[in-house]
């Protein structure tokens, strides 16, 4: 037995097209129920001594020594030139901050080794 299909004639009339679209939308039922998910409990963080970080040993990290900071207006910044002196907020005897990838790691003192600056670490901050 052959199946018979009825086709709706296509109209160029914008009003007819809009009415057909509204009729089709009314035929569709919207399922607005909220799906239920299994309640999960957060996993407590493990102590770092339990984790094996050996596979990350070759990852490069930027370590910076922050000598000090200051705030300037845009006008003062524009006025800087070779020979300008900018006073920082740190005393000469104060330790410099060690920052790894933007995260404060510890502090130390500036030393010179073979005509290069270096940092002797005085404190590593607890995590």
Image (cartoon, rainbow, N blue to C red):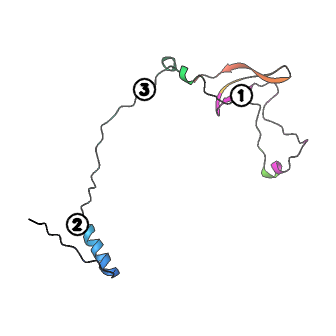
- The residue tagged 3 is 44
Where is residue 90 drawn, in percent x and y?
78, 31
Where is residue 72 drawn, in percent x and y?
78, 46
Q: Please report the residue visible at 29 percent of the width from the left and 49 percent of the height from the top.
A: 34
Q: Please report the residue visible at 11 percent of the width from the left and 66 percent of the height from the top.
A: 2
Residue 125 picture quarter: top right
Residue 116 picture quarter: top right
Q: Which residues are magenta?
A: 76-104
Q: Secondary structure at mark 1?
A: strand
Cα–Cα gap, marks 3 and 2: 49 Å
In this orientation, which residue lies closer to the viewer: 115 or 104?
115
Residue closest to the far top? 49
Classify residue 16 as left or right of residue 60: left
Where is residue 84 drawn, in percent x and y?
89, 42
In the image, residue 80 sits, relative to residue 23, either above or below, namely: above
Q: Please report the residue visible at 39 percent of the width from the left and 31 percent of the height from the top.
A: 42
Residue 66 picture quarter: top right
- The residue tagged 2 is 27
Residue closest to the far right? 83
Eye-nearest disc, 3 or 2: 2
- The residue tagged 1 is 97
Q: Secondary structure at mark 2?
A: helix
């Amino acid at each position: 037995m052959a199946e018979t299909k009825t086709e709706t004639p296509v109209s160029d009339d914008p009003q007819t097209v809009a009415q057909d679209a509204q009729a089709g939308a009314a035929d569709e039922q919207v399922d607005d129920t909220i799906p239920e998910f299994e309640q999960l409990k957060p996993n407590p963080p493990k102590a770092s001594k339990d984790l094996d970080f050996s596979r990350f040993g070759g990852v490069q990290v930027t370590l910076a020594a922050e000598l000090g900071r200051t705030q300037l207006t845009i006008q003062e910044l524009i006025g800087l030139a070779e020979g300008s002196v900018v006073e920082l907020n740190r005393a000469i005897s104060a330790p410099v901050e060690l920052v790894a990838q933007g995260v404060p790691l510890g502090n130390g003192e500036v030393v010179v080794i073979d005509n290069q600056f270096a940092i002797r670490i005085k404190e590593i901050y607890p995590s």
